[in-house]
Every structure is written in C-alpha cells, then in structure tokens.
C-alpha cells in the first residue's frame, strides 16, 4: 500500500525513463529526431484535417477530474477519471457528450473495486476494470457481471495492471503496475493463465516500478506498440505476441533523457531526489500510432510539454510546445503541459481533452464579426463555445490528422 501511495504521488509528474542500448544498435529501425523541426508554436492547419468538439455534459453526479483513458465503442465514450490520481471512476457518455451512467463503487464487495488503474472494452462489449489481483466485468450499461481473480507468481510481484488491452484471442495484454522481471503479461479470460514476457533488464525494471507513462501500450490492426519508463525506443509486438522488435528510435538531440545510476534500494522518493539534481531532462509521456503518423508526447523537468508528430510517408516531423488554432477560434493557443498532453486515440483520430476555459477564452477573444463568421462556417463549434462555462466538464477534441 505504501508503494501504491508513492506511485500516485509521482505518476503525474514522473512519466518515463531511458533505455540505452539495443535501440541504437539496430540499424533497421526508423529514427525520429523529434527536435529537428522544432517550433514554439504549431498551427492546427499544419496537421489537422478537421476537429469535432464533444462537450461532456456536466451534472452534480459526474464531475470529471484528470482523464487517463478514453475509449469510444458502439457510439459511446467510456472515460476513466481521477481526482489527483486517486478515487478512480468510470463515466459513460453518448457520441454527442450526453451523460449516460457511471461505475463508481469502491470497496471489497461484489462488483466493487479497490483502485482500478485502467479499463478496456472486450470483444463481448464488456467493460473490464483492471483492479488489484482481479479483473471486474460489467455489461455495456454498467451492470456488474462477474470477477476473475489472478495472482502473479512471487517472482513477478503482485497482480495489478497499469495498462490493459484486449487481444484478438479473447485474452488481455497488460503492463504490470510494479513489474519485477517482465514488462508485459498476457492474461486469459478467466484469469487462470498468465504468460509473462519482455525482460528489458534489471535496471529498466527497477525504474519502471515507480515511473510511468500516460500511455505506453497502444494497439493497431497489425500489432501492438510499447514504450516504457524513460525509454528512447518504441517496440512493436506481433499480434500473437511471439515477436518483439525495435521499430522506432526517438532521438531527442539536443535535449536528452536522464541516464541515472540505479540502486536496487531506490524507491519513488529517492528517484525524485536524483531527478531534482539534474539541470533538465525529458520524459516520453505518451505515444499514439495511426496508419500514417505517430505522435509522441514529451515533458521536461519543469512539467512543460511538447507534442511531436511524425509522418510515416513523408518522414516529416512537427514538434512544438504550443498549438495555435488558425482554423476555428483563430489566434487561440493551447499550451502543452505534463497534464495537458494527448494520450488517447480512436482509430486514426487523436482524442484530446481540454479544459473549457481554453476554448472559452479563445471564443471571447473573437470580435463580434469573427464570432459571426464562426457561426456561419462552423456552427457546431459556435454552439459549443458560445454556451461554455468555466466550471463545465472537459471538452474532447476529436482530431482527424491530415497527410503532412
């Protein structure tokens, strides 16, 4: 429990750690020099085709804090939300943002959870919560179905998944919360069979026990992609999980990830002290992989953020710490920070949650004539932005990325 509390304290601000070694030795992987085309401000028009706004309805029953996971399935948005990384709840909205229901029962009884770190939607459209030593299943309406319990062997630590994804053979692929030897585990549907794989070495395992990414495990139609704590390599995992390969090397020059000596006695607090002694460093905080592009979310010691996009076709790189709206609320700026960084996708669309104040400020800065242009050209944007309130729930930006 002590380790869990320490993790909660640091998981927002300490996202990743460097993997120095085989990634640079493999000449077949693609290198992404993220700061080779860096600009302070990046306009929407450089990478955006369209953006749909989904305002999440605000009621007394569904106040949303930090959003960690968004899944769009069968016309519904399923959202895991926490307050200061604690007290997780799962909210469900329809495709337009209308509030439908929530799962919010902490405890040790039937259908209750202790502190679920992640969730997924399986092939039966069941909502599956990844809780401590168990997976809890609900139907699409949030009705409790059943619980499957699992225990890791002592050499692998305690069963708790920080990230979880469904597999094509009706099982689950996950990243353990406190890994001891392997970074990945496959769990069958009833929890009776656990297969562990991908041993990155003792030093990397030690660092990954208490430093996490927002999103380090992502699915595609052909494979999974993985990045882990302070890692400079994105790995691909075959759909049958029999092959893991280095796919992309992230070159942060002229900046760098920290290379800190690892002590087996280290914990979250001792690592924080080591990091604080550094002048600056970067952390890979999230990744997303589309058919034609990748995005990489990056943060530094001061918790400032960078968004980097990489075109698979043109090899073009776009990296910035501020995103400028030159399409809708012209002139509005969205700063990228440690907490305000994309970490969810639906297919090829980036799902990015933003506070209502950001859009409200942008709308109010428009002149009357500019607001009228917005109303005529983008009526959906006008309808949302003209009715926003400061204390509303976040708005989801559904970003369709164009070829760049």
Image: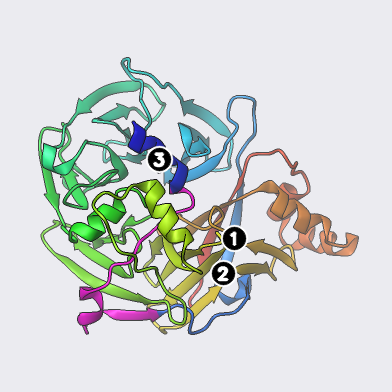
Is residue 168 rendered to the left or right of residue 380? Answer: left
Residue where numbered disc 2 is placed: 48
Q: Earlier in the sequence, mark 1 or mark 3?
A: 3
Q: Does the magenta portion include 205?
A: no
Tell me the quarter of the picture where residue 150 sits.
Answer: top left
The numbered mark at residue 170 is none
> Tag 1's secondary structure?
strand
Q: Residue at x 47, y 72 (%)?
A: 309
Circles 1 and 3 in contact, beta carbons < 8 Å: no
Residue where numbered disc 1 is placed: 51
User: Is residue 198 something one can see in this rendering?
Assistant: yes
Is residue 160 rendered to the left or right of residue 105? Answer: left
Q: Determine the CA span between mark 2 and mark 3.
A: 39 Å
Q: Residue at x 58, y 42 (%)?
A: 96
Q: Does the magenta portion include 13?
A: yes
Tell me the quarter of the picture where residue 315 sits.
Answer: bottom left
- State the extent of the magenta-drawn residues as a range: 11-32
Circles 2 and 1 in contact, beta carbons < 8 Å: yes
> Tag 2's secondary structure?
strand
Q: Nearer the viewer, residue 284 or 126?
A: 284
Quarter the N terminus occupies = top left
Other residues around mark 3 within 10 Å, as few (<14) / some (14–19) / many (≥20): some
Residue where numbered disc 3 is placed: 6
Query: Which mark is in front, 1 or 3?
Result: 3
Is residue 276 rendered to the left or right of residue 263? Answer: right
């Amino acid at each position: 429990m002590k380790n869990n509390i320490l993790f909660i304290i640091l998981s927002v601000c300490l996202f990743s750690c460097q993997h120095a070694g085989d990634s640079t030795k493999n000449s077949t992987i693609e290198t992404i020099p993220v700061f080779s085309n860096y600009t302070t401000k990046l306009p929407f028009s450089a990478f955006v085709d369209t953006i749909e706004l989904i305002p999440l309805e605000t009621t007394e029953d569904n106040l949303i804090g930090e959003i960690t996971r968004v899944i769009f399935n069968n016309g519904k948005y399923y959202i895991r939300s926490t307050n200061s990384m604690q007290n997780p709840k799962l909210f469900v909205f329809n495709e337009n943002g209308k509030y439908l229901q929530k799962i919010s029962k902490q405890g040790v009884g039937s259908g209750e959870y202790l502190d679920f770190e992640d969730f997924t939607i399986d092939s039966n459209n069941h909502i599956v919560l990844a809780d401590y030593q168990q997976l809890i299943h609900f139907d699409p309406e949030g009705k409790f179905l059943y619980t499957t319990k699992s225990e890791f062997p002592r050499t692998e630590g305690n069963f708790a998944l920080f990230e979880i994804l469904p597999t094509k053979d009706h099982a689950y692929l996950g990243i353990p919360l406190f890994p001891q030897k392997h970074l990945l585990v496959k769990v069958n549907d009833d929890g009776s069979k656990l297969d562990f794989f991908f041993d990155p070495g003792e030093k990397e395992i030690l660092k990954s026990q208490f430093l996490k990414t927002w999103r380090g495990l992502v699915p595609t139609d052909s494979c999974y992609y993985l990045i882990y704590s302070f890692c400079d390599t994105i790995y691909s995992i075959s759909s049958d999980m029999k092959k893991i390969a280095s796919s992309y090397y992230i070159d942060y020059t002229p900046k760098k990830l920290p290379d800190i000596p690892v002590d087996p006695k280290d914990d979250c607090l001792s690592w924080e002290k080591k990091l604080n002694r550094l002048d600056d460093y970067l952390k890979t905080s999230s990744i997303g992989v589309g058919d034609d592009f990748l995005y990489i979310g990056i943060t530094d010691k001061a918790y400032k953020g960078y968004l980097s996009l990489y075109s698979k076709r043109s090899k073009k790189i776009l990296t910035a710490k501020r995103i400028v709206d030159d399409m809708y609320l012209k002139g509005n700026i969205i700063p990228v920070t440690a907490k305000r960084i994309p970490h969810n996708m639906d297919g090829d669309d980036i799902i990015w949650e933003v506070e209502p104040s950001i859009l409200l400020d942008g709308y109010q800065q428009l002149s009357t004539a500019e607001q009228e242009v917005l109303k005529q050209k983008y009526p959906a944007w006008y309808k949302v932005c003209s009715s926003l309130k400061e204390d509303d729930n976040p708005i989801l930006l559904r970003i369709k990325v164009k070829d760049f």
